[in-house]
Amino acid sequence: MAINLTVIIKSKSENIEKLKSLLLDIVQNSKKEAACIQYDLHQSKEEPNTFIFHEIWKNQNGLDNHNQQSYIQSFFEISKPLLLQTPILYKTEKLG
């Protein structure tokens, strides 16, 4: 069964462009993964420090594999000082 995720990431104001660059790299790498169905990054127009991922993975194994990728692991370490708060993750079910 497909896994739908929405992830909200907030950057400190002075780190918006640096974080944006890191996030765009994640998009590029994630879309290459076999289990990736959709991996979109959005930036809020009202709050430019807010980034939102919409992700769809084929299954839980695919998502678990994604989270173990070296580029994801290094992002978690590199991004810590750039973030305003801990990212918020929603696992959702598409209703319509």
Image: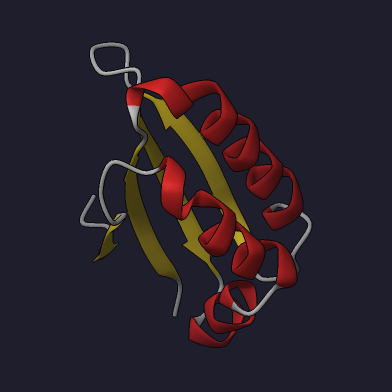
- Residue located 28% across and 41% down the image: 84
For the point 57% across and 87% down, the residue is 61
Q: Nearer the viewer, residue 49 or 56?
A: 49
Q: Looking at the picture, how far across and down is residue 66, in whole percent?
A: 62, 72
Position of residue 7 measured from the top left corner of the image (x, y, whole percent): 35, 52
Going by the picture, which residue comes out furthest to the top?
Answer: 45
Q: Residue furthest bottom?
A: 61
Residues 23 and 30: in front is 23
Residue at left offset 34%, top offset 22%: 13
Q: Tell me the residue at 44%/54% (across/down).
A: 80
Query: Along the horizontal axis of the image, is 19 left or right of 43?
Result: right
Q: How many marks?
A: 0
Answer with left or right where residue 28 lies relative to residue 26: right
77 up-or-down from 22: above or below? below
Horizontally, is 5 left or right of 47 in the view?
right
- Where residue 94 appears, x then y in whole percent? 27, 58
Q: Is residue 24 above or below residue 43?
A: below
User: Relative to residue 75, is residue 20 depicted above or below?
Assistant: above
Q: Please say if 22 is above or below 47.
A: below
Quarter residue 14 falls in: top left
